[in-house]
Every structure is written in C-alpha cells, then in structure tokens.
Amino acid sequence: MSDATDLQKELETIGRQARAASDQLRGMSRSIKDAALRSIATRLRDERDRLKTENAKDLAAGREKGLSEAMLDRLELTDARIDGMAEGLETVAALPDPVGDIVEQQIHPNGMRIARIRQPIGVVGIIYESRPNVTADAAALCLKSGNATVLRGGSEAFHSNCAIADIFIEGAVAAGAPRHAVQIIATTDRAAVGEMLKQDRYIDVIIPRGGKGLIARIYDESRIPVIAHLDGICHTYIHEDADPEMAKSIAVNAKMQRPGVCNAMETLLVHSGAAPMLLPPIAEALAADGCELRGCERTLQLIDGIAATEDDWVTEYLDKILSIRIVDTLEEAINHINEFGSHHSDCIVTEGYAPAEQFLDGVDSATVYVNASTRFTDGFEFGLGAEIGISTNKLHCRGPMALEGLTTMKYVVRGAGQIRG
C-alpha cells in the first residue's frame, strides 16, 4: 500500500470520526462542555513542563532553519503564554453557550410559531501556521459551540501542537466529551493538507490561518467552503490634526509591541501637513527599538531609511520592519489602505470628528480604529474569549471569529396541524 493511499485512508478515518463526534456534541449540555474546558485549563497549567519541553524542540528546529526572532517569538510557549491559554479556556467556559439561542421568532397568520435558532456548524477543519496557542483556542471555541474539530498545525510548531492537543483531548474525554471531538493530524507531510481538503463528505468548513501561500493553496484545492483568515497588512494613518504624543505612542505600540502577529502595523501613512513635525520623532523611537524603516521618496527626505518599493505596500513583514508613505489627503490614505491592505485592521489618529467618521466609513476593513492601536484586534480583547482567528471574509463572519461565528441557523417550526392550501 502506498504512502499516499495510507494518508488518504487516515484522513477519511479522521473525518468519519469527527462527523460521529459532532452528532454527539450537538446535543451535549453546557455543563459538560464547560467542565471539560475547565479541566483542560487545569491540565495545561499542571503540564507546563511537558509543554515547554516539546516547545523547546520546535524552537531549536526553528533556529536551525533560520526563522526570524519575530517568528520564534510567535512560536515560543512561555509560562505567561501557557497561563494565557488556560485563562482563555476558562473565559470561554464562562461565556454564554450560543447553541440553542433563539435569534428571531414570529407567529405565522395560521398560528405556526417560526423560530431561527443557533446550531453548531458540525465539523470544523482548521489549518494554521506558527502560533501553538491556536491549537487550544480553536479547539476550545469549537467544543463550546458544539463542533467537532480537525486541526492541522504548521510543521514549525509540530511538537508543541501535538502536546497541547493531547492534553486537550485527555481533559475533554475525562469530562465526558466524545473521544474524537478534537483530533490533530499528527504528520508534517504537506500532502496531508491536500487530503484534508478533499474530505467534503465529513468536514463542513475549512478555516485557514497563515500566509498568502497557504491561503492560495487552500482556495485552489479545497472542495469544502473556506472562511479565510488572510494576512494582516494593517495601517496607521496620522492625520494632519493628530496629537503628536498620541500619534507616536499608537504608532510605536502598533508596530513594536509584538511585531510578529497579524494585527501589528505594517504600513504607516502620514499626512504631508503633519509629516515634518510628527514623523522624525516617531521614526527615532522605532529605530531605537531596532525597527528597519522603508520609506517613500518624501519620507526619506525627513528620516533615515531604505527606499520602499511597490512590493513593500503589500508585504506582511511579521518582523521589525515598517513601510512609511506620506500622503496629501485623507482620501489618498483611504485609497491606499483599500488598494494595498488586507482588510484586517486599520487606524486613524486624529483630533477631528469629521476625519474620523470619513475614515470609518471609507476604509473597507474588518476592524477600523480611531485613536487606538491595531494590536487590540483580538477575540480576548473584544470580550469574545479566545478566537479562531481574524476573518477577512465578508460572508458569514468578519473580524475576530469566536463562538457565534462557529454556529449556523436552523428554522424550527411548531404547528398544530396546519396544512397549506
């Protein structure tokens, strides 16, 4: 039997098991799901040494491959991040269960009661890169929303992902959840992704988190509907009336607080009327923190840096690199963001009401900010508990995708013998 045939059979088995588990999860009580999540949170804390040992294998391999410091930061599991994963699970456990919520209800003229009720999607396939905390966050949200999960993490976090998934499964089963409610594809073979994308008989939706190459491949190969979580080419635009200290604080935080994540700023736009005064101190602060600056021609007349190319405007660096462009109008800033951005998270820094409203109306992104760092685009920060990711889709779910985004609708009609004439 060939390796390809073995892989195909393995993915079919995983899919079939997930479908059976989803049938059990659909009617599972909130008390069991919440108990499972709290149990898993405790296990993650208790097993931190095991997690860090497995994570160290991934970090060592990453260094050998020459991963950037920002990418290694995304990969690392510190005590604080393990505690954060556990806290995220406990937060999800404390959230209302969306399954069974009556979204809308009406009475037909003939007396029938028609209700729209939230239901689990069924089986959710998640394909992701780098950050191992996604394993816990995604599995927790799917379990709480009554969905079975098939996880396929990136090879760079293989050992970490498998360890987190094993602990998650142990805790879930101990609390009464189905054995196959959460499954991880435990291979680094890239062909496994292709086989997973063929399992439309069992998997209801694919949620990818990663770079353009991964997303493009999934769109090309998937037989299953996709909710894309594209790259984060996020912008901060400093308007001509911006407060200088606020502008500096927001820009530095948006880029440098954690540069290797999708909600970090990748392009800074500055109004030409404010640039001579505001740009040099911002650039100085960024450079002092080790950020490489790539600027347009007018930018380089004001600060030291490297000449930006057209490619820079469409690049998600995930590193201490920033592209900077000076614009003459708010309209030019909005047009730049809509043309070159990934419709993820974008911010305006301004003291004016009218510019803020124009920016909010004009920028076509999942999350838009006035006078706040793009780093807040996060399910936990938005009060959603953990998150599957930041959806840049316009259909079904947009922005931080959490419990409600993992449900669909069912019409429930209650009658008393009505027939249609």
Image: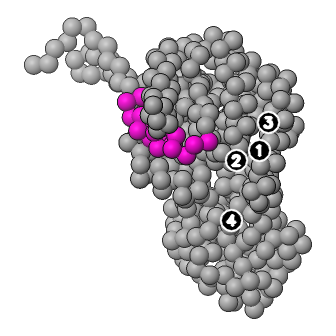
Q: What's the residue type where badge 1 is placed? A: Asp
- Residue 311 belongs to the span the image colors magenta: no
- Residue 308 visible to an observer of this rendering: yes
Disc on the earlier residue, 3 or 4 = 3
Q: Which residues are magenta?
A: 188-206
Identify the residue position indicated by label 1 in the image: 58
Disc on the earlier residue, 2 or 1 = 1
Question: Could you say which disc has been placed on residue 54 in the image?
Answer: 3
- Quadrant showing the C terminus: top left
Crowd class of label 3 (few under 14; some 14 to 19; many from 20; radius 10 Å): many
Disc on the earlier residue, 1 or 4 = 1
- State yes or no: discs 3 and 1 in contact (Cβ < 8 Å): yes
Q: What's the residue type where badge 4 is placed? A: Tyr
Q: Secondary structure at mark 4?
A: loop
Question: How far is disc 1 from disc 4 in space, using C-alphas?
Answer: 21 Å
Task: Residue at 75% x, 91% y: name it.
Answer: 301
Task: Residue at 49% x, 21% y: name it.
Answer: 17
